[in-house]
Image: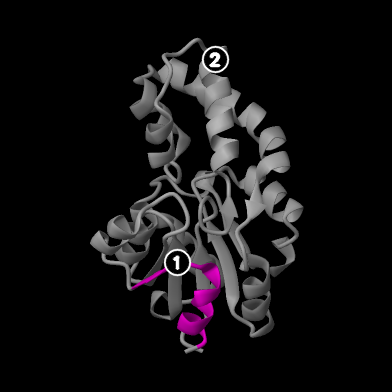
Amino acid sequence: MKYTTLIFDFDGTLADTKTSILTTVKKTQEVMNLKSANETEIVKRIGLPLKTTFEELYGLTSTELDTAITLYRSMYDEVALKTVTLFPEVYKTLQVFHNKGIKLTVASSKGKQSLVKLLENLEVSEMISYIAGEQDVENKKPAPDLVFHILKTIKDDSANTLVIGDTKYDIQMGRSAGCSTCGVTYGNGTKQELETASSTYVIDTFEKLRDIVMD
C-alpha cells in the first residue's frame, strides 16, 4: 500500500454539500437583512471557515460575525440532513480502503458536531478513524494544523499520508504538512486551480483514488 492514512476534506470531496451551504447562507442573509451575496462568490468560499466566508462576503463587524455564525449553525443541520449526499463511488471506495486497514480520516472547516451527524446519516461513520472539525485547531485551512492534529492523534507520519480535497485550500494544507495531495475536480474547485496549487495527483472521479492508493 502506498499510503497508510488518507485525510479527506468533506464538502465537495466526500459529499455534495453545495445546496445545503447555499441555502443556509441565504437564510442567514435574509434573517440578518444583509445585502444579497453572489451565488458564485459563496461557492468559491466553500471549504473555508465560516468566519472567513461571512467576513469576505458581507464585511461584518465582530459582533455581527458571531451572530451570523451562530444563526448559520442553528439552521444548517436541518437543511443538510435532507440535502447532503455522497458523491458516486465514495461509499464503495471507502469500503475497499477500510477493509485493507487504511486509516480514513476527515479534516473539515465544518463544526465537528455537524460532521459527526452527517457522516452517521450518510452511513460511513463506522469506516472513519478520526474526524477533525474547525474547533480542533486555532489556525484553519489552508494552514496545516488540521493535518498535524490528525496525524498526532492517530499516530502516523506525513510521509505515509495522502490529503484529498476539491479546493486549493485543501492542497495547500496538505503540502504545508509535508503530505502527498490529491485534488478532485468534481467538487467546488477547478482542475486549473488544483494543478496551480501543485497537487501531487488530480482525478475527476472518486474511484480513481484506488489506483493511486493501492499502487
Confirm or deny contact between disc 2 and disc 1 (CB under 8 A). no
Residue behind mark 1 = 204
Check residue 70 for magenta coloring.
Answer: no
Q: Residue at x 44, y 49 (%)?
A: 188
Disc 1 residue type?
Answer: Asp
Q: Residue 98 location in percent, x, y?
A: 66, 77
Disc nearest the viewer among 2 and 1: 1
What crowding class fits label 1: few (fewer than 14 Cα within 10 Å), some (14-19), or many (20 or more)?
few
Q: Residue 129 location in percent, x, y?
A: 64, 68
36 or 61, which lies in front?
A: 36
Spatial separation of the CA atoms under disc 2 and disc 1: 35 Å
Check residue 210 for magenta coloring.
Answer: yes
- Mark 2 or mark 1: name the one nearer the start of the chain: 2
Q: Residue at x 51, y 58 (%)?
A: 13
User: Which stretch appears magenta?
Assistant: 201-214
Residue behind mark 2 = 30
Q: Give the SS element for disc 2.
A: helix
Q: Residue 103 location in percent, x, y?
A: 59, 75
Disc 2 residue type?
Answer: Glu
Q: Give the SS element for disc 1.
A: loop
211 or 113, which lies in front?
A: 211
Pick out the residue farthest to the left: 196
Q: Residue at x 66, y 51 (%)?
A: 85
